Image (cartoon, grey):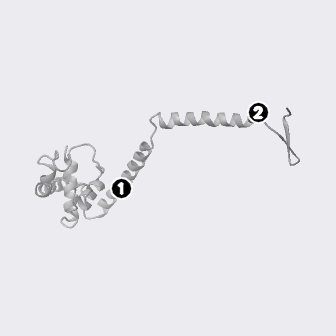
């Protein structure tokens, strides 16, 4: 039997295997795919670390902006006497507004433990102030209509003083 066939005057020869270049490219693609999966999927690589780095940089910028605002506004917590006064006011406010959820020693209850080293929404000044002012999903009410800026700052100082 002949390996060539004639279809409407076009000579056709049936190949027994694919061209070598296609087999080489397919092999390279499969090897690359296995390496890619092994490295990115099974090695523990995660973009979470990159996201945490971005969040830390953003928090650092917020802290720098907050400190710049503190130095130019009427709120200046540079003296230890003023800081201790803010903490004292914050402690009183905590006793009247926060103790029912966060507990007597701020160890938690309905609300989370405020003596931890990390908070769910961040332990930076601005993050704590935002939590107090605007509230958080899951139970933290907003107090922006009930507290002045100085009272919020007093609570922030008190919360940051907790250990």
Q: Position of residue 57 (x, y in %)?
A: 40, 50
Q: Position of residue 15 (x, y in %)?
A: 78, 36
Q: Which corner quadrant of the image does residue 77 belong to?
A: bottom left
Name the residue at 56% across, 34% down.
34
Q: Which corner quadrant of the image does residue 70 belong to?
A: bottom left
Front one among 78 and 56: 56
Residue 16 badge: 2
Name the residue at 46% across, 38% down.
45
Name the residue at 42% across, 47% down.
51
Name the residue at 47% across, 33% down.
43
Q: Position of residue 84 (x, y in %)?
A: 16, 52
Front one among 151 and 82: 151
Say which element carries label 2: loop
The residue furthest bottom is 145
Q: Earlier in the sequence, mark 2 or mark 1?
A: 2
Q: Position of residue 157 (x, y in %)?
A: 21, 53
Front one among 140 and 12: 12
In the image, residue 76 sits, relative to residue 112, either above or below, namely below
In the picture of the structure, the residue carrying the numbered disc 1 is 62
Say which element carries label 1: helix
């Amino acid at each position: 039997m002949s390996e060539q066939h004639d279809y409407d005057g076009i000579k056709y020869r049936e190949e027994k295997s694919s061209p070598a270049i296609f087999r080489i490219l397919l092999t390279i693609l499969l090897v690359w795919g296995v390496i890619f999966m092994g490295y990115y999927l099974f090695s523990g690589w995660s973009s979470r670390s990159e996201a945490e780095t971005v969040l830390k940089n953003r928090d650092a910028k917020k802290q720098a902006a907050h400190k710049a605002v503190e130095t130019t506004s009427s709120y200046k917590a540079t003296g230890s006497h003023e800081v201790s006064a803010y903490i004292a006011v914050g402690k009183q406010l905590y006793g009247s507004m926060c103790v029912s959820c966060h507990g007597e020693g701020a160890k938690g209850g309905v609300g989370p433990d405020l003596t931890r080293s990390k908070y769910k929404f961040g332990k930076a000044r601005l993050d704590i102030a935002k939590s107090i002012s605007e509230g958080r999903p899951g139970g933290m009410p907003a107090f922006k209509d009930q507290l002045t800026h100085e009272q919020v700052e007093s609570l922030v100082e008190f919360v940051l003083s907790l250990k």
